[in-house]
Image (cartoon, rainbow, N blue to C red):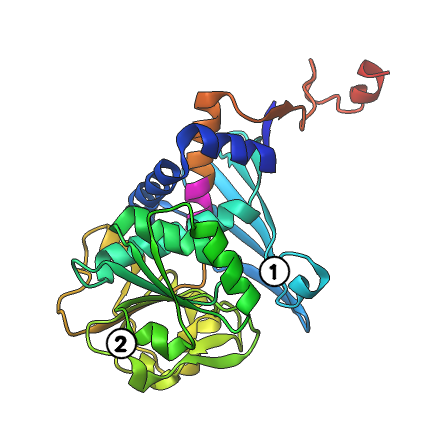
């Protein structure tokens, strides 16, 4: 039997575990999995690009599980009242190849992206910082904000979006949480009020959401909006003065901010920080950048955590996705058995 996890199952799971504990457990799952980087069979995702978006397959495996995610990125979807990003994922047994878990991953992608940003901030953000800025208050914004609130005890939030309605939505969704919300008039106002910022815009363009000369010493940036060739958010001059951390260099050089540089200097991969191979922030004055494009290990981590929790709480639907026959060589008997 294969456990199927739909949207209502994720809601039931979060209700049982609580949003805070799920996010904190996910940050720790990511830390543990990144720390054992060499145990995974890894590759850049397979992407098929279209004028209006991208569709991707993201596979990864270790000695026990094979995981993959199907995901899209269509920036114009909201105009049709559709999500920019939707996803499904699967966790399978390496020993048998049988599917163990098939799950929605639109919500889980938002969770794992936010938890990965928070993990990077734990290593790279200035110490004792209580402020957080987010530029782009679309679908990812509340997840990013709450991940930093839970994992780093952030409570002062500065935010900006070109869409006033998106900021209204952001405020309404976060009102129940113990946060002080500061609506800003532009991106620079966000930058001027905090040293910890996430950029989460969706425009498919070589944009400059942040200018290099806006950034003060000691700032840490999580960049999550640029995740495809020709899709960036930062002034390339900023990249030359930042200490850059990435997920998988081969993928980031094609899809990340560093695609703007002919010879980018990468300080470390996130796994090196998680494994203690390299330190994170080493100076209060340095500018750090997590050039995140999303990597399959993050999907593996969230699928593993969800599998563990839904098994523990008995959540999800068990379905026959593989024929179970007395004679495995007699597949055709499926028709007579079920006649």
In the rendered structure, does residue 278 fall within the stretch colored magenta? no
The relative height of residue 305 versus residue 161 in the rendered view (above or below) is above
- Residue extending furthest right? 339
* Magenta residues, dominant SS class: helix
Q: State the SS at label 1.
A: loop
- Residue at 33% x, 41% y: name it: 24
Q: Which residues are magenta?
A: 297-302
Quadrant of image for the C terminus: top right
Q: State the SS at label 2.
A: strand
Q: Residue 255's spot in the image, x, y percent?
A: 48, 70
Q: Earlier in the sequence, mark 2 or mark 1?
A: 1
- Residue at 33% x, 47% y: name it: 178
Q: Which residue is mark 2?
A: 242
Picture quadrant of residue 144: bottom left
Q: Residue 20's spot in the image, x, y percent?
A: 36, 40
Q: Residue 158's spot in the image, x, y percent?
A: 35, 65
* Of 61 and 327, the residue lying toward us: 61
- Residue at 55% x, 45% y: name it: 105
């Amino acid at each position: 039997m294969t456990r199927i996890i739909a949207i209502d199952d994720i809601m039931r799971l979060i209700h049982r575990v609580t949003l805070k504990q799920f996010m904190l457990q996910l940050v720790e799952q990511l830390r543990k999995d990144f720390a054992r980087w060499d145990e995974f069979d890894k590759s850049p995702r397979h992407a098929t690009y279209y004028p209006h978006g991208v569709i991707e397959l993201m596979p990864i495996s270790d000695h026990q599980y094979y995981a993959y995610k199907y995901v899209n990125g269509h920036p114009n979807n909201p105009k049709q009242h559709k999500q920019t990003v939707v996803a499904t994922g699967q966790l399978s047994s390496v020993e048998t190849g049988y599917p163990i878990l098939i799950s929605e991953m639109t919500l889980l992608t938002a969770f794992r992206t936010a938890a990965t940003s928070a993990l990077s901030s734990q290593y790279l953000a200035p110490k004792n910082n209580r402020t957080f800025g987010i530029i782009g208050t679309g679908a990812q914004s509340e997840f990013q904000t709450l991940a930093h609130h839970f994992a780093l005890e952030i409570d002062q939030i500065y935010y900006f979006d070109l869409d006033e309605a998106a900021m209204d939505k952001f405020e309404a969704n976060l009102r129940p949480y113990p946060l002080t919300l500061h609506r800003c008039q532009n991106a620079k106002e966000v930058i001027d009020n905090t040293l910890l910022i996430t950029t989460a815009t969706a425009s498919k363009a070589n944009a400059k959401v942040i200018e290099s000369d806006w950034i003060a010493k000691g700032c840490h940036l999580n960049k999550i909006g640029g995740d495809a060739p020709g899709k960036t958010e930062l002034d390339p001059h900023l990249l030359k003065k930042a200490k850059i951390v990435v997920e998988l260099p081969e993928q980031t050089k094609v899809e990340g901010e560093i695609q703007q540089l002919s010879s980018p200097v990468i300080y470390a991969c996130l796994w090196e920080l998680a494994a203690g191979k390299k330190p994170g922030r080493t100076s209060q004055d340095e500018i750090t950048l997590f050039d995140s494009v999303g990597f399959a290990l993050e999907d593996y981590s969230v699928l593993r955590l969800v599998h563990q929790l839904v098994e523990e709480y008995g959540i999800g639907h068990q379905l026959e996705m593989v024929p179970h026959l007395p004679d495995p060589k007699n597949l055709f008997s499926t028709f007579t058995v079920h006649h």
